[in-house]
Image (tube, rainbow, N blue to C red):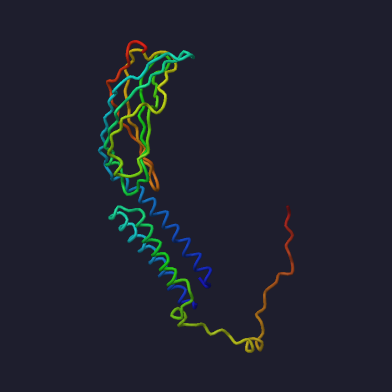
Amino acid sequence: MHSFGYRLNGLLTFAVTILALMCAITSLSDNFNTPSPSAEIKIININWFQKQPQGHDEVSLMMNVSADLQSLFTWNTKQVFIFVAAEYGTPKNSLNQVSLWDAIIPAKENAKFWIHTSNKYRFVDQGNNLRGKKFNLTMHWHVMPKTGKMFADKIVLTGYSLPEEYR
Amino acid sequence: MDWQGQNLVEQIMQIMLLVFAVIAFVAGYVLGSFQMMMIVYAGGVTLTALITVPNWPLFNRHPLNWLDPSEAEKHSKPQVAVSLKKKGTKK
């Protein structure tokens, strides 16, 4: 440590190493958070339900999505990405997951919300299996940290079904 | 900076950085603010740098007495032992 440059280099290297350690501990502290989220989705209306020219079923629906995801936020949370997916089985695929709507929640205040919306992304089947189909609507979320590990989880809401006939 | 100063400064630097890291983490955790942790830590690093990096006179209180150049000329330089024979190595 016999010169200005050597001391400065040593200090900065040590400081950055300790910073990396602090970030690791910060990420670990996220594990102490026990979230208690809730969500509710109601299908208000089926706008239309048709067989497309290529032969695939497509449906457009209006839904009310409400959720309280405030408990997911910690001091180490940058944002929460949520999406709603329709899940059902068909003879061809044991599980289909079609993403209908998503959003980014930037802060805790915005995490308790109610939204009336049509599906942001097209609800299209691989085939024409949707008539009278029973499906689940699952709210998935990814808690994106400022540093470290990302946590992902979901809530499954059951009991939804599509009409028997095209309209 | 003399040797004792360098030792002292290295110790001060390591301890100060660790202490500021702990203070910064606790402050950030308690206040629930990642930004606060970063600000406190950055302040700590700057303060430590100001104290330990420049050549403050207080770290030079035990200076070494280097031999005066004119004195050194008068005494013979130490002999370096040179091996004149290289043992052949087989590859």
Q: Tell me residue A155's x, y (percent).
A: 30, 30
Q: Pick out the residue farthest to the top.
A: A165
**Figure check: B53 above or below B29:** below
Image quadrant in which you'd find residue B35: bottom left
Q: Nearer the viewer, residue B2 or B49?
A: B49
Q: Is residue B28 above or below residue B65?
A: above
**Count of numbered labels shown in the rendering:** 0
Q: Residue at x 28, y 45 (%)?
A: A32
Q: Position of residue B39 (x, y in %)?
A: 38, 60
State the residue at coordinates (42%, 66%): B46
A79 and A112: which is toward the camera = A112
Q: Nearer the viewer, residue B54 or A117?
A: A117
- The image quadrant of residue B47 is bottom left
The reply, left or right, for residue A36 in relation to residue A79 is: left
Q: Position of residue A148 (x, y in %)?
A: 40, 46
Q: Position of residue B45 (x, y in %)?
A: 42, 64
When the figure is inspected, residue B74 is found, relative to residue A57, above or below; the finding is below
